[in-house]
Image (spheres, helix red, strand yellow):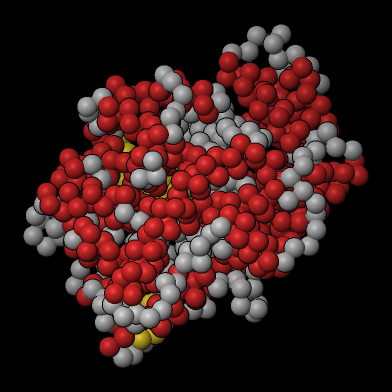
Amino acid sequence: MTMLLFPGCNPEKKTENPFFSEYQTPFQVPPFDKIDTSDYMPAFMKGIAQHNAEIDSIIQNQASPDFENTILALDKSGKLLTRVSKVFYNLNEAETNKQLQSLARQLSPIMSKHQDDISLNEMLFSKIKAVYEKRYALKLDSQQLRVVEKYFRDFERQGANLPADKKEQLRKLNAELSLVSLTFGENVLAETNENFKLVIEDKKDLDGLPQGVIDGAAETAKEKGLEGKWVFTLSKPSMIPFLQYAKNRELREKIYRGYFMRGNNGDKNDNKEAVAKIVKLRVEKARLLGFDSYAAYVVDENMAKTPAKVNEFLAKLWTAALPVAKKEGAEMQKIIDRDGGQFKLQPWDWWYYAEIIRMEKYNLDESELKPYFSLTNVRDGMFMVATKLYGITFNKRTDLPVFQKDVETYEVKEADGSHLGILYLDYYPRDGKRGGAWCTDFQSAGWEHGKKVDPVVSITCNFTKPTATAPSLLSWDETTTLFHEFGHALHGLFTEGKYTRTAGVVPQDYVELPSQINENWAGEPEVLKAYAKHYKTGEIIPDNLIDKIQKSSLFNQGFETVEYLAAAILDMDYHDVTEPKDINVLNFEGVAMKKIGLISEIIPRYRSTYFSHIFGGGYAAGYYVYIWAAVLDSDAFNAFKSSGNIYNKELALKFRRYCLAESGNDEGMIQYKKFRGQDPSIDPLLKRRGLQ
């Protein structure tokens, strides 16, 4: 039996803390099998001390500030702290427990103080400013110049120019924000994974559900000590099929209410107070730093530049999408009336009736598709696309330590066989993992002592688990999700650049371009025929099913666009607030949705009390970026399609170079136009979503 990282007691623990030296593992991946929970705090403390000493060395240097002794020294500082942070914070998302959560709470004020000690250090900033002011006289190359300007801008945005009393105020705000955001995330995790489960004892309540879904619910029940029953949870691979197929309307409402009432139940995990506090603190912070609102502070760094431009963009899409969603809802109401339903369509009905329409209009049943999308086939399909586009290959490794027994590892090689990086794949839901899917890294690409540092990238998902009778079979949404996250992974694997501050670092509304363009290949007929094979027979997906996928691609796009845009607009409304005041979260949300005319049959993709992207993650005033980047990805993929070859190697080479490898070399739109040769058009996106 493999010994895992938790629960934090390792009887074979060595005296040496594994973070204190270079990892003695293949490709310098983290030695998860050697790391004990007790290693983290000493490593953080030593990492902070080392980082402080490095910063002090920059300050005490008597030589005139220049690129080497100030900017480069700052850029290369904090290596130990980065090393332990990348393991700890990633595992606190993917494989947490009470001990890690307790450590995260202890570390929150410590890390906030440390970051502020650097960004608000007057002597350090004076040195950076000195280099900035003479940057043109130093004869720096374009990338050195960019790094100098980025660091100067960072310090300004982090309050380096504030007077002493305002700096102290900023420190308090940052510490409070850090802690309350952590609390928000812990509450959502508890509400999703611990505080709700739908237990079914009567087999009649399973009417309508495909056998694979029923088997999965039986496996979940067994895991939870309820053998002989069926359990559905709020993880989407469990909840969405129930909403799609279960005939029992009361139970559909029960599970969906469990989902959209998360953090809003007036108990210890209630998040309304946390949301109100975060919004208020962020306004205070933005005003302190010279911005009218937190949205203005955030978007100032993005391609959009102003909240007004974001709101104008969202409004244009909303105007196109809402009538389509209303039409879809009316079509569902007709079916309810036709079948003698005698009720008005509600949010928990949408998936069910969408599935009926999908069957009636396109004769497409999602359960008919799933057998062709086993997880292993989808994984191999996305690898194949990357190989055809970029020449890279993926070799499975079984000799690398992992943080959980189901995690797979791959060595990624260039076409010439040279090592490019390592990829971790973590597929299935578990109690210690937050919901959703994301890509991160345990080591970023870069340079150290004149040598290239190879990336160690990780994809984390929450896909349908295998059962006793079938492998993990993915829905179409899960299939495109895996391709999406793999696009992020390719960005991380291909990133080049000598400087930590700029290598792969792009505006927030550019971030989703590499991921979203990758989704496009998943549904191309020639790609589907290469990877979509029946898990039992090996039969290639038939043309009639591919045709159905293609024809139904515009199906339900009104709903999908509206529920997303509603959340994006809600995010902007929260962060467009210009005065630090106490808000009633439910009233605020209600007013925001009434203002845009959101129909009662649809709720925002994320309601306030579980909107982790903006209150527990890094997308505050930035949830809009997915659809902003969708304009870019639609336009970019259109270049491949228009060329007559979706594997066009010349275009792939340009995309890899300008939009992935060198993405941090210049501003986002400049890099994009180096690839495309022109401004992006919104038309391919509107056409793809049937909104034109």
Q: Pick whichever, 336 or 57, lies toward us.
A: 336
Q: Pick whichever, 304 or 278, lies toward us.
A: 304
Q: Is 164 left or right of 199, judged from the image as shown? A: right
Q: Which residue: 57% across, 29% down? A: 502
Above-or-below relation of 206 to 466: below
Q: Which residue: 79% across, 20% down? A: 130
Above-or-below relation of 368 to 388: below
Q: Pick whichever, 502 or 519, lies toward us.
A: 519
Residue 143, percent from left and from top: 57, 19
Task: Mark yes or no: residue 241 visible.
Answer: no
Residue 684, percent from left and from top: 37, 35
Task: Mark yes or no: residue 641 visible.
Answer: yes
Q: How many marks?
A: 0
Q: Quadrant of the C terminus?
A: top left
Q: Pick whichever, 273 or 99, lies toward us.
A: 273
Residue 656, percent from left and from top: 38, 28
Extreme bottom residue here?
202
Above-or-below relation of 493 to 285: above
Q: Is 10 left or right of 125, judged from the image as shown? A: left
Q: Which residue: 61% across, 53% down? A: 571
Q: Which residue: 34% across, 80% down? A: 341
